[in-house]
Image (tube, rainbow, N blue to C red):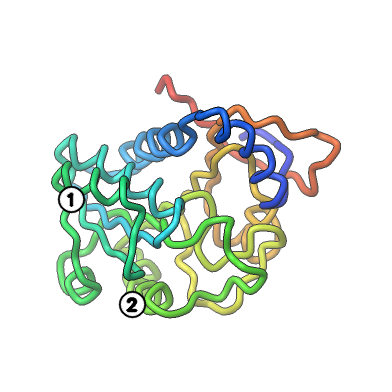
Amino acid sequence: MTRVRAYTAAQVRAAEAPLLAAGEPLMDRAAAALAAVLRAELPPAGRVLVVAGRGDNGGDALLAGATLASAGVHVDVLLTADAAHPRGLAAARDAGARVVSLDEAVAGPDYALIVDGIVGIGSSADPTLRGGAREAVARLLPAVRAGRSRVVAVDIPSGVQPDDGTVGDDVVLPAAVTVTFGAVKAGLVCAEGARRAGRIVLVDLGLRLPEDEAVATGDVDLFDGAR
């Protein structure tokens, strides 16, 4: 474990902006690292459910799911909104992932891993999940709480406020592992967030964040892409 500094969502987004403007493929790098962590966590013949929201967090999850599906892993996709990240969804489908309904997801055999790609650091000050996201999490929670499925969160567990770690209620998928990108979000190491994040794996994306502007610190594993 390594002690690192943590930052607010606004600080991370500001550090990402010049790299995105320069055309750096941050999403592809994040998705590749996420896929590697998922492979390491997945037991033999384990099934994966990618739960994807409409934004870039869902895009990361879908692209990682596409990588796993291309390698022969059984990957199902559950969309929590009426839209999804177009490139990520197309990649997942082209790789052989199957889009399923919530009823299908909870009725079939348990998934070894549930990938929480519902909401990232763009969430509002009130992190409470609503609509399709809330329904999906509520119905997947029993398998997670019973230990039949493990959760890998994308950047931050959905329903955790990224700056202060608060949650609106208990409709949050507790992660066994959170793969966070660029910098540790303060909400992962504070309050309820620290109890919902599980093991934190930090993926370096080359962001420049002043050490003296950090708002918290936490212990993480540093992603080693060579493994």
Q: In which quarter of the image is the C terminus?
A: top left
- The percent position of residue 38, horizontal first and vertical second, equals 35, 42
Residue at image location 42% in from the left, 80% down from the top: 131
Badge 2 is on which residue? 139
Which amino acid type is shown beneath numbered disc 2?
Arg
Q: In which quarter of the image is the N terminus?
A: top right
Q: Classify residue 148 as left or right of residue 107.
A: right
Residue at image location 23% in from the left, 48% down from the top: 90
Furthest toward the front, the residue is 21
Furthest toward the top, the residue is 226
Q: How many labels does the image show?
A: 2
How would you rate the neighbour count of disc 1 (Cα within 10 Å): few for under 14, some for 14-19, many for 20 or more?
many
Q: Which of 76 and 93 is in front in this view?
A: 93
- The percent position of residue 187, horizontal first and vertical second, equals 66, 57
Residue at image location 72% in from the left, 62% down from the top: 164
105 lies above or below 26? below
Q: Classify residue 31 as left or right of residue 77.
A: right
68 lies above or below 58? above
